[in-house]
Amino acid sequence: TLIRPLKPQRNALQQVFVDTFEALKNVSFRWILIGFLIVSMPVGVGSALTFYMNTFFWQISAQSTMMILLAYTVSVSIGYFFAPLIGRYLEKRFLLIVGALGWAIFAIAPVCLHYSGLFPLPGSVEVVYGLGVCQVMAGLLVSQVGVTVSSMLADVADEQELSSNKRQEGVFFGTYVFVLKTTSGVGGALAGMALDIISWPVGEHIKTFADV
């Protein structure tokens, strides 16, 4: 027999907002969301501009772009696999900071090194290898952010139970996923707005660096 709740719940939609605002009262949860927003927004922008950067800036083929994205995906999976082992020896906050900063460094390193004259020339085979290495390192590091945030949310749920005598894992993880999807979409929108601001040429004839 299920135990009857002490207080009857409101209608479903209203209860969602009530639970969400109650969860946002938790200071630890608010800081996790703020930090994740700061990290995930640039990730969304970078993901949306990957095709443009690889095609028109680095001047590499679609096949090379696919291989680089595949390397990134595999590295993220490897990072997820080793994250629990790494978490046994390093503090979660340290892992979160290192993962976020490491991703940012390897995400912008190719462009910075290019303008410093220290990166392979666009269109060369070497630039594909260079981009691949940076994407692998970025994937290994950004995966630590995802795992660490999920682990922190579990700790926040325990903290919430101690302070309010309520388990709200569903609210915490649901809000986290909502923010993840929202920032990804907003990042794509910002990337599109940036292309409009610089009057990026459009049309079926825009296919390579030479067409820009």
Image: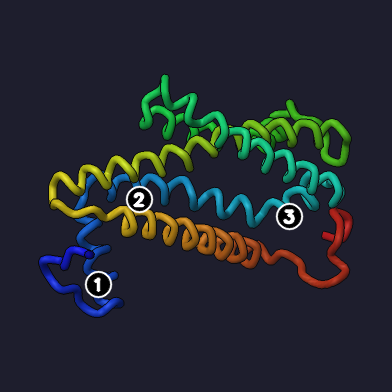
**Front-most of residues 79 and 124:** 79
Considering the image in quadrants, where does the C terminus appear?
A: bottom right
The image shows residue 171, relative to residue 134, as above or below, that is below
Quick check: can you spot residue 104?
A: no
**Is tag 3's residue or tag 2's residue first in the polypeptide sequence?**
2
**Is tag 3's residue or tag 1's residue first in the polypeptide sequence?**
1
Residue with the mark numbered 1? 15
The quarter of the displayed image where residue 206 is located: bottom right
Which amino acid is tagged 3? Tyr
Residue with the mark numbered 3? 52
Residue found at the far left of this picture: 6
Q: Position of residue 85 (x, y in %)?
A: 49, 25
The quarter of the displayed image where residue 205 is located: bottom right
Helix, strand or loop under label 1: helix
Q: Residue at x 53, y 63 (%)?
A: 185
Residue with the mark numbered 2? 33
Q: Position of residue 143 (x, y in %)?
A: 54, 38
- Graded by Cα atoms within 10 Å as few (under 14), some (14 to 19) or many (20 or more), the crowding at tag 1 reads few
Helix, strand or loop under label 2: helix
Which amino acid is tagged 2? Leu
In the image, 197: left or right of 41? right
Which amino acid is tagged 1? Gln
> Do residues under tags 1 and 2 come within 8 Å of each other at their CB atoms?
no
Q: Residue at x 74, y 36 (%)?
A: 131
Helix, strand or loop under label 3: helix
The image shows residue 62, relative to residue 122, as above or below, that is below
**Front-most of residues 143 and 128:** 143
Q: Position of residue 163 (x, y in %)?
A: 13, 47
- Graded by Cα atoms within 10 Å as few (under 14), some (14 to 19) or many (20 or more), the crowding at tag 2 reads some
